[in-house]
Amino acid sequence: MGVVQQTSFTSPLVGREDELARLTGVLERARSGEARAVLIAGDAGVGKTRTLDEVAGRAAAAGTIVLTGHCVDLGDVGLPYLPFTEILGVLAADERFTAVLAAHPVADRLLGGGPDDGGDGGDGGATTRSRLRLFEGVAALLTELADIAPLLLVLEDLHWADQSSRDLLRFLLSRGVLQRSAGGAPGGRLAVFASYRADDLHRRHPLRPLLAELVRLPAVERLELRPLPDADVARLVRSLRDRPLPDTTVHRIVERAEGNAFYAEELVAATDAPVGGVPSGLADVLLIRFEQLSEIAQQVLRTAAVAGRRVGHDLLRDAVGLPEEELESALREAVERQLLVSGDGDTYSFRHALAREAVYADLLPGERARLHGAFARLLAARDRRSDSAAERAHHYRESHDLPEALAASLEAADHAQRVGAPAEELRHVETALDLWSAVDAAARPTGPDAVTLTLRASAAAAHAGELHRAVSLTRSALAGLGQDADLELAARVRYTLAGNLLSVDNLSAAFAHSSEALGLIPAEPPSSTWVWAAATHVMTARQVGENETALRVARRALRVAEDLGVTDARADLLISLTSLEGGNRSTPQGRERLLEARELARRAGNAPVEMRALFNLAIGCFESGDLEDCLPWAAEGLDRARRSGLLSSPYPREMRYLRLLVQYTLGHWDECVRGAADHAGVLPAAGGHAIGPGLYVALARGDFGAAERARAMLEGPFDWMGTLVAGIVLTDAAALRGDAAEAVRWARSTVEALTDDGVPRPAVTVRLTTLALSAVADTVVGLRRTGDGAGAGRWTDTAAELLEWARSSAAHGEDGTPQGPEGQAWLARAEAEGVRIAGSGPDPASWEKAVAGFAFGDAYERARCRLRLAEALLAADRREEAAAEADTVRREADRLGATLLRERLSDLVRRGRLTDPAPAADRASVLTAREQDVLRLLALGRSNRQIGEELFISAKTASVHVSNILAKLEAASRTEAVAIAYRQGLITPEPTTST
């Protein structure tokens, strides 16, 4: 019958899969004759109407009559039976139901055509009988409608229902349409879905007793729509804008919306507004319930809003200055109106953070400052614990007591540092820096100066994963150094800046600043500052290829570190020397040195250096092809980072990526995708480190949207890993689409973006150029098949350049020595692609070498090389071997879910006839399957030689097939044969593509 009435929404429905499944199940039971009702509870804006609209749409599509009635807040003058009269009005306007309504006079009575049965007449008994007849009439009408087609009755906003509507609903659910017959037969094909706001039901609300009565009925159930999970709110927020919002904006909206879809939509709509706070329209909605409170209750809530989201009873009592009885009465009123909720430890919290923000924003400036001052003084008097310093700092700052705010901010930063919370430490130190110049020097705390504080902020930023912020802060510290600055402090600023520049891959600048740092402070007398300056200089020198300088400085600094007992610097230098003295991290000797460094760093309690050692142990295993051995080291490093509160710092980011990469490489793709999704949700700023391998899986499984998600990582400040991941995905996507020019462009631009001045190309160059070479090879082979030798020749110089880049990259790894198994495998594939481009004939041996190269554990790339090997074996007429390789590719592609590889395999199997052909269609049965393949190529204008190359047969065999086709179709020429084939439907025109 379709939907008679339905709300229209522009925003998408996100999440709610479980709730929709449950409601759909109720509808299915109702369609089979088991009448049911569901009472749907949820806070305002949580998505009740949107969920019901979705269910109604599905029901209508399945042939259900959907009728919706709305209750409206009309205060004390509510109109009786309002939602039911709305439903009957819609029915009356639909001529399909004219006959049904004519048979039930109750419709006229409710629509105003008969006597008013909702009032209180003089004869109470007569009124009761009249109401009973009306209720029975509505039940009979609904039952007859349900006989015509399954019926869904939706009643929205039941918390505003008038008394008459509540009474009618009670009757329908307890004695009317849901009841079974006396013999126990099923009721009508009817479902009733009624929604109400849970947060509007104060203790004396008239709907509460009705709900308690209804949920005890066997055919009635209750469904609570809880706030959406953060991941679903993030999806909703991103879907509401055509252009992507920054991750920081999305996560702030998610945090503030607290699972409420309406709040999220309003916050998104206000993202372009010039000021912060709660959007005005949303604030008006949030303040409606607040303004219904008594004056004293409003005063209490204003004071509580200044305290924050949560406040203790005693603290609130002292701040508001009310007698205990008046305070308790006001709190009870606020709790009953569901603006506050009571919690453990004698505390009260705002039910929703945005409600608190709206009340707070409604305060007058002077009132706000006065209350903040009161809270600051109360907290200082009763609680000087360091974990309350942040709260005190906030209240002092908002009350304009800046000296006390500065002291409390520094105390809060110290506490955050002790508990391993670098993001919070950064926030508090930056607050202190903002206050520094506004506080007289005499009123500042003794100890740090502005430059030292800025250095501390940069360290906290680096530990929190805010790498570009760390660089910016250290540059500020450098700019703040005076002409007479202490040399040790000047050196510390410069080598800290060098280390931060390394983390954002600004290698040349890092080397310049570390050189300055080492030159500022003398090596004699020995000092720990010189040792750390030297250790940083060793790292930057290695990154720019100054290995001799790095080795010389490292050996000297190691001796000084041993003499001074600077254990963690000694550990750091041992890690650097691992790749400078021949026994790199992928060798047993290198691992022994790294284990020693890990132990030294652990003994010194230096978590970042310990994590550096663990990362090098993990990546060393990966580079040597010991993929399984890599995972325990990465797990240990991440555990150390977790215990230190440093999960967002550089080395843990690298280890997360490495763990996902190992899962991807070993073919554990579902595990990789889950891990990438978890990382992206928890650590969005990690970019390519968090989601990279998940994008590799998505692309291999046919999701070309992965390319757009990769392209988005190139927006904003330069991120080395994000650029690498995006380059791999975009190059491979272009190659898979057959766009050689685009693949080459992405490979070149990515290598250039990842290469610093004077620094060798990165190790990933061999992978990027090989992916581009595969696209070039496909293009060249295709051009040769069409006889366009000149077109194929135009790719010669490009192919030669890419192959040279691949060879150079594989020969010179990170430490100047040849890359390990992975790099050599990619080079073998590059060489095999080069053979295809050269066109010197099939060369299975080159692809056998590539397959063997990826045997270290890369399941997908090995399967891709096997497909090429099967193709080469076919061209060499080694059909049995080709079939065996194709079968292996099929099994691996199916295991991985690599749909694109499976499609390419199917095409090869069809062209090479590696499996029994499917039965031909009736009209095509005159030709064999092979003759149909030849006919298709004949229609494309291919010569016998070209047909043979594409179908892996000789030109002579192709000629025989062409002759057979001409004879069977009784055609005098190739052109006539094609024309006959088109007329008989043996072939269809090839689709054309725009370029």
Image (tube, rainbow, N blue to C red):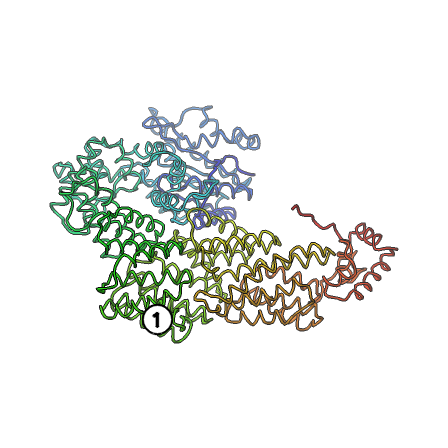
What quarter of the picture does the N terminus occupy? top right
Residue reaching furthest to the bottom: 588
Q: Along the horizontal axis of the image, is 60 left or right of 281? A: right
Residue 170 visible at all: no
Please indicate whether residue 472 sits to the left or right of residue 53 in the image.
left
Neighbor class of circle 1 (other Cα within 10 Å; few <14, some 14-19, many 20+) is many
> Is 412 on the left-hand or right-hand side of 89?
left
* Coordinates of residue 475 in the picture (x, y in percent): 31, 48
What percent of the width, then of the height, locates residue 424?
27, 50
Query: Is residue 64 depicted above or below 833 in this figure?
Result: above
Question: Is residue 593 visible from the viewing direction of this image?
Answer: yes
Residue 319 position, x and y percent, is 15, 39
Determine the image quadrant of residue 286. top left
**Residue 423 vertical placement versus 364 (above, below):** below
Out of 871 and 458, give the one closest to the viewer. 458
At 43% from the left and 44% from the top, the residue drawn is 37
Give how far across and how far down residue 74 sits, in percent.
Answer: 35, 28
Amino acid of disc 1: Leu
